[in-house]
Structures are given as C-alpha cells and as structure tokens.
Image (spheres, rainbow, N blue to C red):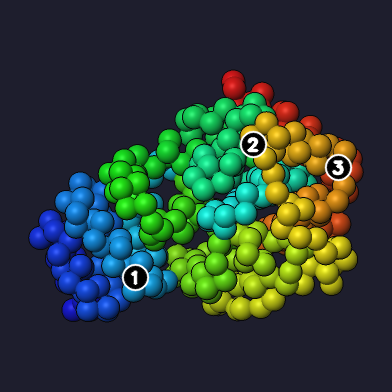
Amino acid sequence: MTKRDREGSAVLMDNSLKRAIETLIQRRDLTATEAESSVELIIKDADPCQAAALLVLLQAKGETADEIAGMVRAMRRHMIEVQAGVPCIDIVGTGGDGHHTVNISTAASIVTAACGTPVAKHGNRSVSSKCGSADVLEHCGVKLTVPPETVERCIREAGIAFMFAPAFHPAMKNIVPIRKALGVRTVFNILGPLLNPARCARMLIGVYSPSLVELMGNALHALGAEFAMVVHCGGLDELAPIAEATIAIVTASGVEMSKLDPFELGFDRCTIDDLKGGDCAENAEIMRRVLGGKLTGPITDAIVLNAGASLFVSGQAASIKEGCTRANEAIQAGTPLQLLNKWAVLSQA
C-alpha cells in the first residue's frame, strides 16, 4: 500500500471528507483508495456540505478512471446482488444526451435476448428524458420492483430481466438528496452503468459525451471487465446510423480506441429527429411495433445496430455485421415481441 493509499484509508478513520476535499482543491487526483473511502463516508452519512463539495470539485477537475473505479467498488459493496447463474450482458447508456430518442437500448436488450444471449438489464426511471427504460418497460407490463429471486427466475426462464436501480442500491438514499440539491452533473451520472447487481462481465455502454468513451473504457478495464464496448455516436449515448461512432473496446489486455461506421454495415443514414420518441405510451407502442416486425426505418435500424453490437460483445456473433443480421432476422420473425410478453407475465408472478 502506497502512502497515498494509507492516507485514503485514514479518511475513513477521520470520519471526514476534508482530506479528499483538500486534495481536489489543489486539483490533484484522488487515488482509487481515496475515492473509494470517500464514497464509503458519503454512504455512511457524511456531512452533506462536504459531500457536495467533493462531488463538485471532482467534476470541476475532471474524474479519472481510478477515481471512478474506486467509487464503483464502494457502491458495489452495498448493492443487493443478483446471482444470474449464466453469463449475462447489459446494454445500457448513461443518459443525459438530451435528445429524447425512443428507448433504443431497452429494445435492443429484448432483441439480444430473443437471439439467445441472456440479458441482465439495470436501469431507472427517466431523469433527463421523457421516458426511461423503467418507464417504458412498466408500460409494457414488466413489474419493476421485484426481489432478486424474481430477477433470477426471469433470466432463467425468459433469458432477460430488469433490475430497478432504487430497489438494488439502498446506499443511494444518502446520495440522491445531495445530487438533487446540486442540480448539476456529477460522477454519479456516469457510475450507473457500472453498478449492475448481476455483475455482468460483458457490456455495451453508451456515454453522453465523446470525452467519456476512453475514460469509461479505462474504468471498465480497472474493474476487470471481460469484454466491453463503450460508444458515443453523433451526440447520442448509443449507436445509430447518424454518424461514425467513437468506440472503446475493452478486454483483459487493455483498451483499444476505434471508430464504427454504420454505413459500412449497410445502414441508411438518418438524423436524430428520425429517432425521437414521445411519452411512455408512445414509446411503448413504437417498441412493440419494432419488436413484432411491424415497423421499418431508422428506429428499427438503430435497434438492430445496437443488438448486433451486443451479440458481438457477448460472443454470440463473430462480427457486428453478423450480429445485425441475426437481430434483423429475429425481428422479422416477431420473436422479440413474444419474448417481451412472456417476460412481462413472469415478472408479475
């Protein structure tokens, strides 16, 4: 343990965030241990003013991968875990891109599961959009607040489940009021995708800013991800046939930055406006039409693209293009809609 790490452990002994705050005032990075200890103190009801100061100073300085990884480790210790029983993937975005598109990653999750890859989706209600993943799934009949046993049964019998973040992260009770009072983005805006209660080793994660792609990739690597892809595409926190995407491929050996061109995969170019949704009722209807093979065009293309990438990340497809072909075939057969209906019934049992 380094001197800085020992000092990070001492933060807990002091029962104060003062040391970490002083470090950040000097615009110095926290070690992973210091960041981890700081979150432990916030969880254990640290002074709200100190907690707010730490989050704002961290945001102003710019978070590092080590700081994010340390905070994730602390949060994971306090989450209610799910024993999926099989390797699962999560397809998730940070949110916050501000474009109010339809629920692309949620629909892609269902398509991915319909292709045979187990999905353990972690999400929440809308914060900055009109309709979050939890909102649209609830509108489709999926019960949100369920115990781990129900999640595990859904994965076992349907190949997909949803973990409603507030039900699995009781430690957030001391953090939510601080975030609301601040009203600005903090590190917790990007921690969510890294806090899956099923501890998925493979993930497709979208981020709201291109500057976060490599940062999130390095954090995933520090946390021991088996295989992950972090993406940002033309202003969106998911893949879409609107522009070339910036991506990070994360493996045990490191992080490789690259580009993904949807047009080389055969997709027609569209605009963000083509992907916009509405309220929960409208988004649920659009999603059902896509999953049942009743809607073609840009929205379906975006969902196929994300499902194809997910099948590649999961190892079920040899390439993203092959994954897209499989996803499209499943949609044309209507199997994702059948799976959604089955899942909704299972979640209520």
Using the image, tell me which numbered label, if any, was put on residue 295.
3
Element carrying mark 1:
helix
Give the foreground label among 3 and 2: 2
Local crowd size for mark 3, using a 10 Å CA cut-off: few (<14), some (14–19), many (≥20): some
Name the quarter where the N terminus is drawn: bottom left
Query: Residue drawn at (80%, 60%), measured in percent from left and top?
Result: 270
Q: CA distance from mark 3 to mark 1?
A: 44 Å
Residue type at numbered disc 3: Leu
Examine the image and state in which quarter residue 314 appears: bottom right
- Front residue (pair 70, 214): 214
Residue type at numbered disc 1: Ala
Identify the residue under disc 1.
60
Using the image, tell me which numbered label, if any, was put on residue 279.
2
Query: Residue drawn at (56%, 76%), measured in percent from left and top?
Result: 255
The tally of labels here is 3
**Residue 271 appears at what percent x and percent y?**
76, 60
- Asked if residue 118 can be seen in this view, the reply is no
